[in-house]
Image (tube, helix red, strand yellow):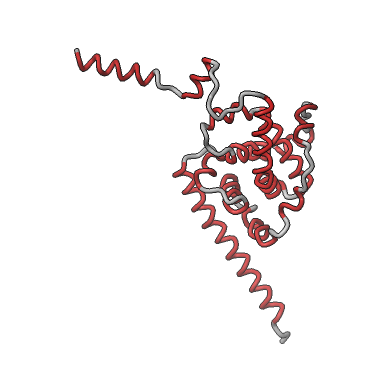
Amino acid sequence: MADRDQRAGRRQAQAGSGSLSEECRLRNVPIEGIPQSKAELDARFTELYKDHLRDVYSYSYYRVGNHHDAEDLTEQTFLQAYRHFGRALRESEGRPLRPWLIRIAHNLAANFYRDKSRKPESAIEDAGYISAPHTTEALVEGREELKQILEGVSQLPGDRREALIMRFALGMDNREIARALGRTDGATKVLLHRAIRQLEGIVAEKSENGRGAASQNGASPS
């Protein structure tokens, strides 16, 4: 009987030990570190925007391949992020929000060409808030070497391409990439390993073909 009571007590304790943020939300209790006014929320979002504009634009640029579409994708990413920012702060429980932002950009990029002909319209107040001047075109200057490497990345399938863009273009670690792609840390490690091996094969093949062509061009006619 005593053992049964102890087990019942543990189950009751576990049932009552849910997420602090969820409990606070249900009871309408302020959560420490979470903005409680729109002005505070906007200020926090402005920080997020400044901190990660380069990341989102760079990711978008390497996905769509040109400045104009990358700007559009970046704007749509931050518009969507702004609408769900309060919830993201609560659910993140203090974790960095960069993977969340890149996941939004990832999902938007996946549908980019399909939805291009019916571009979504933004609420006026949201668009006005996001349209602060910035010079995103300069964000990829000086990255010619990286762009050449990513030409090989473009030949990789789906998530392998995504993972390498996040790793090399954004400098994200395995855990961040896992969160952005919705994978486990272990699966992400395997994904990156296979992607790097495949990329090495592509680069080696291109290098070999380049040397062969140079040898033929330099050969003397018989």
Query: 118 left or right of 213?
Result: right
- The spot of residue 95 in percent (x, y) is 52, 37
Reply above or below: 8 against 207: above
Reply above or below: 26 against 83: above
Residue at 51% in and 51% down? 192
Of 28 and 2, which appears nearest the observer? 28
Residue at 53% in and 43% down? 176
Query: 6 left or right of 182?
Result: left
Residue at 65% in and 52% down? 154
- The outermost residue toward the left is 1
Give the tally of numbered discs: 0
Classify residue 15 by image quadrant.
top left
Classify residue 100 by image quadrant.
top right
- The spot of residue 4 in percent (x, y) is 23, 15
Of 191 and 82, which appears nearest the observer? 82
Residue at 60% in and 46% down? 162
Classify residue 111 by image quadrant.
top right
On-image quarter of the N terminus: top left
- The outermost residue toward the bottom is 222
On-image quarter of the C terminus: bottom right
Reply above or below: 155 against 181: below
Of 35 and 214, which appears nearest the observer? 35
Reply above or below: 118 against 187: above
- The spot of residue 141 in percent (x, y) is 73, 57
- The spot of residue 221 in percent (x, y) is 73, 85
